[in-house]
Image (tube, rainbow, N blue to C red):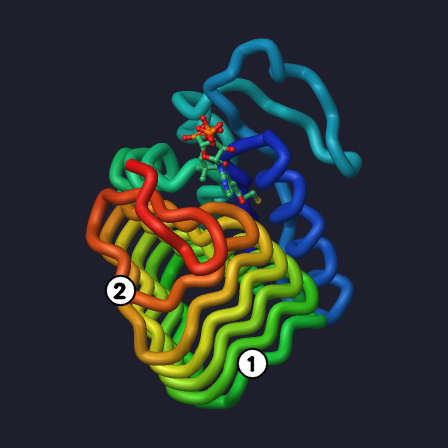
Amino acid sequence: MKVVIIGAGGHGQVVADILFHMWAKGRDLELMGFLDDDSSLAGKEFLGLKVLGNVDKLDDIGHEAVIVAIGDNRTRLEMTERLKDEQLITAIHPSAVLAPDVSIKAGAMVCAGAVVNPGTTVGRGAIVNTGATVDHHNAIGEFSHVAPGVNLGGEVHVGEGALVGLGASIVPRLSLGDWCVVGAGAVVTRDVPANETWVGVPARKIS
Ligand SMILES: CC(C)(COP(=O)(O)OP(=O)(O)OC[C@H]1O[C@@H](n2cnc3c(N)ncnc32)[C@H](O)[C@@H]1OP(=O)(O)O)[C@@H](O)C(=O)NCCC(=O)NCCS
């Protein structure tokens, strides 16, 4: 399957690496290159793959599927809507450990060393980043980002577009509202309302 990676920044390169690992494990993938609307990246090469131009060039490139590999949650959502007629693949690093009943929706990304336990759903376009642990029966919302090293207890709900920052821990059965931000290193002991930013141990609202 011919795949174009949308986004050539840091996260795009992480996703390219995941796709190479999937290919090495026998997945039928042919990586065509990156597209990125940052014109300063055009012609550059990362992991041996070229940045072929801006996203409008997609129609000129033979492909069957894309993956929207943009780290910023809002931009990833908007780009996915712009490309709504495209087939989205998921990227799951072969070193990630997923229970057999985990549901990973289209366009989601699960990075190296992540662990996702039974009963969990990872929503469309969500990121479970490097080494994050997601315990049982979590609901990871669409276009959210569970950053590297995060620990989510059982039955946590992560809202749409939420960012759970590097190394944060969320105690079981809590709900993180849509588009909220949990700061790096936080320990969250209460529900976080939508659109708020909480930091610290225990986490408290800062905005
Ligand atoms: C929480 C966060 C979003 C705040 O960013 P911001 O809105 O730019 O806020 P500022 O840096 O201006 O900091 C505001 C205050 O909060 C404090 N603060 C910021 N982040 C903090 C954190 N993670 N833990 C504790 N305190 C924090 C700052 O020290 C500052 O305190 P002060 O007013 O007493 O000086 C950011 O610091 C953060 O933790 N982002 C997570 C990023 C991440 O993990 N991304 C994933 C990468 S793969």
Residue density around tag 2, few if under 14, some if 14–19, many if 20 or more, within 10 Å = some
Residue 191: assigned label:
2
Q: 106 above or below 143?
A: below
Cα–Cα gap, marks 2 and 1:
26 Å
State the residue at coordinates (74%, 26%): 45
- Does residue 167 appear anywhere in the picture? yes
User: Splitting the image into 4 quarters, where does residue 57 fall?
Assistant: top left
**In screen coordinates, is 203 left or right of 5?**
left
Q: For mark 1, give the secondary structure.
A: strand
**In screen coordinates, is 122 left or right of 9?**
left
Q: 70 above or below 26?
A: above
Contact? badges 2 and 1 (CB < 8 Å): no
Residue 98: assigned label:
1
Is the residue marked 1 within 8 Å of ligand 1, measured from its CB? no
**In screen coordinates, is 44 left or right of 79?**
right
Along the line of sight, the residue nearer the viewer: 131 or 108:
131
State the residue at coordinates (58%, 65%): 132
Along the line of sight, the residue nearer the viewer: 105 or 167:
167
Is the residue marked 2 within 8 Å of ligand 1, measured from its CB? no
